[in-house]
Amino acid sequence: MQMKIKLAVIVAAVAALTACGQKEEAAAPAADAPLIVKIGHVGPTSGAIAHLGKDNENGGRMAIEELNASGLVIGGRPVTFELLAEDDAADPKQGTAAAQKLVDAKVNGIVGHLNSGTTIPASKIYNDARLPQVSPSATNPKYTRQGFDTTFRLVADDTQLGGTLGRYAIETLSAKTVAVIDDRTAYGQGVSDEFEKGVVAAGGTVVAREFTNDKATDFNAILTSIKGKSPDVIFFGGMDAVAGPMLKQMKQLGIEAKFMGGDGICTAGLPALAGDSLADNMVYCAEAGGVDEAGKPAMDKFRADFKAKYNVEVQVYAPYVYDAVKLLADAMKRAESADPAVYLPFLAKTDGFKGVTGNITFDEKGDIKNGALTLMTYRGGERTSLQVIR
């Protein structure tokens, strides 16, 4: 009887092991089974600057569709890319929640966020998870100066952008005095600080420094105070959703100063937000990016394809999101792996990747080398490029 029990136990154990092996064999993907690669994208697709967040997300979707049509093979397996898009509403708390959600979803890489104020806190979550993150638009220098080897940026930072605009105000627009307003976000304060430094370095004088917030609509008190100081230029560090109403109130108060801002106001949507208060050659801004004549055909094609697909003009950073997605795929292909731990070193060594935004090479911090700036103004309700600076 005891022998029969032992034999039954042995038989059961063998059966269990066999079944376990069969399950593992069934779970293991076939060598030619599609490899699913998830790319996370985060931007504000709700709230005042939802038009910018959707612009970015659409750039990512375009890249995903093209990659899936290209028949890319990584590690001997055909790849299917998926975009997992999250909304951070330009809010740091919602941004970190979105970041954790994507980490939990085990995405293979991150493109985003749009704003510096959401990108910076989210970057720690991605770094802790060892997930590569490519921001197409966050310009605050702190983003790539935290000691994280997972952070990468495709545009010039505020040190270059704000400083260039400050010098441009004094040296090219012949301003002698400027007033500065920022929206208290990481981006707005950062670009305003650098603008102020550029003004002072060029010999100009800052006669006022005021602040508002990124959801404000009434600026009469601030602007009335500034009007009394008669600045030649008013600089706003913030986004177009706030700049538009601010320009309207400047007109109502009879303020004739030139208006300047960074990439946050330098959008295709500013004319609609500002209405008839946007006079020709009144607003000057800089986009943290841009292409020279050699790169113009590729960018023009992207813009035409984008409009044909989505029936809307590119706002600002859709091409950079598009390049970021393609860049992650390129690093995976070079590494022959979509495992973040395996392809991260290959991403860091990116040198001369040809994107629609130009050639991409990263420095030791993850910043783009030789990043471009495009100085712009508005004429006839349209953005007009003045100069590409590197």
Image: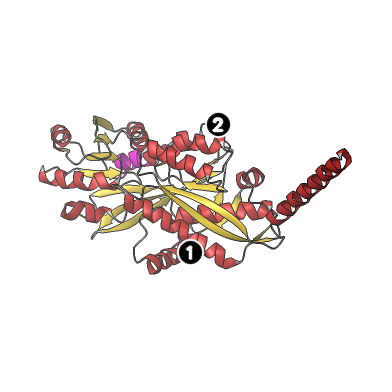
The residue sitting at 73% across, 49% down in the picture is 20
**In this rendering, position of residue 359 left or right of residue 56:** right
Whether residue 297 is situated above or below residue 191 in the rendered picture: below
The residue sitting at 37% across, 34% down in the picture is 186
Dot 1 alpha-carbon crowd within 10 angstroms: few under 14, some 14 to 19, many 20 or more = some
The residue sitting at 48% across, 39% down in the picture is 100
Mark 2 / mark 1, whichever is N-terminal: 2
Q: In terms of depth relative to the viewer, which is nearer, 126 or 20? A: 20
Residue 28 part of the magenta segment: no
Q: Distance between the residues labelled 2 and 1?
A: 34 Å
Q: Which mark is residue 298?
A: 1
**In this rendering, position of residue 183 left or right of residue 145:** left
Whether residue 70 is situated above or below residue 254 in the rendered picture: below
Q: Give the residue type that dot 2 points to.
A: Gly
Give the total of numbered labels: 2
Q: In terms of depth relative to the viewer, which is nearer, 121 or 1? A: 1
Residue 358 visible in rendering: no
Tell me the magenta residue range. 163-175
Q: In terms of depth relative to the viewer, which is nearer, 47 or 177? A: 47
The residue sitting at 46% across, 46% down in the picture is 112
Spot occupied by residue 50 in the image (x, y as percentages of width and height)? 32, 50
Residue 384 visible in rendering: yes
Q: In terms of depth relative to the viewer, which is nearer, 229 or 181? A: 181
Q: Quadrant of residue 243?
A: top left
